[in-house]
Image (spheres, grey):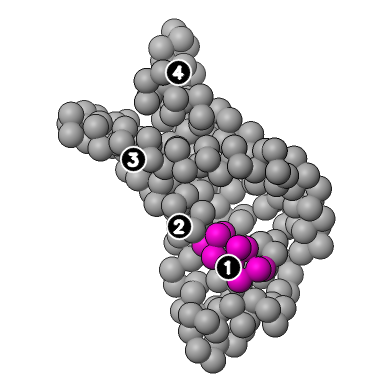
């Protein structure tokens, strides 16, 4: 199997987890309890001894092979706006995944924290963390949908459904923008008040001494 073919099939596998992940984030609009309840139920699917190792391996391989493909494509030269959209969004997604995975490992396996709603909400609770994580979450989510949109556009174009190709791209990109805005507003506490548990304040204080919400 070629790296490109693996990248495509692995993307389809990861898409199943991504759907569940964003479903959790969307329920956060209804409150912290709703978010954590849905997350706990969905974790039975992807956070178990059988599925989770494959999921983590899939993410690591996607980062490595994705980086290889992007470097190859860049070296061959980029032609047209679609190529730039695919490569730029791809690099942002890879950066997002790499940091997200390492942050999860730190919070969950090193600090022993439950990476529930308070994990992303903690770094959106105030300065200086929000200065970095607000654009981080926004660009990460938008770039993911733009990158998927590029893939869908190309697939429709090759399937002789050219009239739907561009529509498919913009529809996914618009969905990503809406998701990014909704997730950021939720984590910032726009829809309801968020009070971080002491454990998460202590976690943040490990990076910025004396930090208070």
Q: CA distance from mark 3 to mark 4?
A: 21 Å
Q: Earlier in the sequence, mark 3 or mark 1?
A: 3
- Residue 19 visible to an observer of this rendering: no
Which element type, helix, strand or loop, lies under badge 2? helix
Quadrant of the image occupied by residue 122: bottom right
Task: Tell me how far mark 3 sits from mark 1, CA to CA.
Answer: 27 Å
Residue lying farthest to the top in this orientation:
160
Q: Are marks 3 and 1 in contact (CB under 8 Å)?
A: no
Cα gap from disc 4 to disc 2, whole angstroms: 29 Å
State the mark number for residue 90: none
Q: Which residue is mark 4?
A: 155
Point out which mark residue 99 bears.
2
Mark 4 or mark 2: whose residue is earlier in sequence: 2
Is the N terminus in the top left, top right, bottom left or bottom right quadrant? top left
Q: Residue at x 53, y 40 (%)?
A: 57
- Image location of residue 129, percent across then percent down: 49, 74
Identify residue for label 1: 110
Nearest-to-viewer mark from 3 and 1: 1
Mark 3 lies on residue = 67
The residues colored magenta run 103-113
Residue 111: x and y, percent? Answer: 61, 71
């Amino acid at each position: 199997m070629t790296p490109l073919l693996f990248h495509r099939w692995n993307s389809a596998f990861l898409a199943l987890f991504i759907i569940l992940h964003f479903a959790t984030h969307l329920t956060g609009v209804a409150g912290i309890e709703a978010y954590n309840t849905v997350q706990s139920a969905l974790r039975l699917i992807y956070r178990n001894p059988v599925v989770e190792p494959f999921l983590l391996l899939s993410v690591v391989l996607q980062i490595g092979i994705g980086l290889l493909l992007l470097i190859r494509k860049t070296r061959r030269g980029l032609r047209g706006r679609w190529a730039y959209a695919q490569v730029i969004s791809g690099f942002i997604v890879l950066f997002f995944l790499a940091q997200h995975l390492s942050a999860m490992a730190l919070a969950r396996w090193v600090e022993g924290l439950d990476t529930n709603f308070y994990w992303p909400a903690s770094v959106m609770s105030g300065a200086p963390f929000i200065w970095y994580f607000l654009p981080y979450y926004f660009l990460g989510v938008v770039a993911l949908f733009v990158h998927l949109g590029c893939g869908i556009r190309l697939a429709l174009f090759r399937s002789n459904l050219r009239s739907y190709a561009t529509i498919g791209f913009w529809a996914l990109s618009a969905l990503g923008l809406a998701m990014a805005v909704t997730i950021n507003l939720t984590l910032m506490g726009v829809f309801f008040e968020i009070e971080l548990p002491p454990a998460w304040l202590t976690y943040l204080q490990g990076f910025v001494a004396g930090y208070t919400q």
